Image (tube, rainbow, N blue to C red):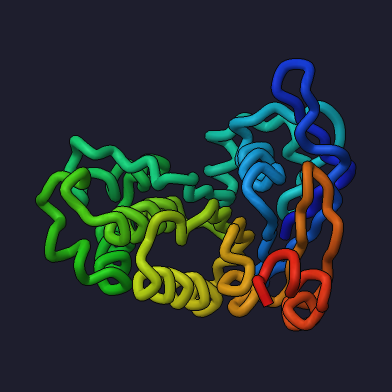
Amino acid sequence: MLTVEGLRSRYGRIEVLHGIDLTVASGEIVSVVGANGAGKTTLLRCLSGVQPVSTGTITFRGDLITTVPAHRRAARGLAQVPEARQIFTNLTVEENLRLGAYLFADERVDKDMAEAFAMFPILKEKRNLAAGGLSGGQQQMLAIARALMTRPSCLLLDEPSMGLAPILVAQIFEVVKGMKALDVTVLLVEQNAFGALSISDRGYVMETGRITFSGAAAELVADPRIREAYLGI
């Protein structure tokens, strides 16, 4: 589904990604975990096309997309749920969802919205209210639902648990697990390493712009070095 080779990126003269190699197979949930400032968000921004790549390649569903504009990546089925949600707070819940479907003008849009409301019933209840009035957890649900309106084959999730109460974090992770039933592949970036790895097939650990560990999620959770450094165990 997604292959990254030798990816480097910089902000000005400061390089923040130093040769990232990563793969995500179709149907997988893959997590990238690490401390704040490790470069995880920059990695996702490079994949979605909003952050320039210095060197290296990104291949999506067999096509090289390293220089493809962000909106064309979305049209090909690569959608991002950005850090801090970035919903349109002055628009209603339904208007946010319809903006997510901007690529389409067919009868399926209403069906897609009905499926989003079935996944997140609270959004249906508040469909005509301003999105800025939603709680943090509800806004995260809206951000995920909006991304699903693009009919993605691969979803890039950036820190979906950020700022949420533990019970809401558990709900969001259950939603991410449910993406497999929708045939949506997931690349999940998270500081909550244990939570992310517990729902993932495989994982990568990032430190200061480099991948330092990778493997099956269960193996990473069991690794004493990772348990001490990232899981607090």
- Pick the quarter of the image with the N terminus: bottom right
Q: Is residue 27 visible?
A: no
* Tally of numbered tags: 0
Q: Position of residue 53 (x, y in %)?
A: 76, 30
Q: Position of residue 129 (x, y in %)?
A: 11, 50
Residue at 65% of width from left, 71% of height from top?
Answer: 232
Image: 207 above or below 64: below
Q: Nearer the viewer, residue 169 or 67?
A: 169
**Going by the image, does 70 lie left or right of 43?**
left
Residue at 62% of width from left, 43% of height from top?
Answer: 41
The residue furthest top is 12
Q: Position of residue 184 (x, y in %)?
A: 55, 67
Q: Nearer the viewer, residue 152 or 144?
A: 144
Residue at 59% of width from left, 59% of height from top?
Answer: 190
Residue at 28% of width from left, 38% of height from top?
Answer: 88
Image: 170 above or below 188: below
Q: Is residue 98 visible?
A: yes
The image quarter in which residue 26 lies: bottom right
- Pick the quarter of the image with the C terminus: bottom right
Q: Nearer the viewer, residue 232 or 177?
A: 232
Image: 143 above or below 186: above
The image quarter in which residue 115 lies: bottom left
Q: Nearer the viewer, residue 156 or 83?
A: 83
Q: Position of residue 137 (x, y in %)?
A: 31, 61
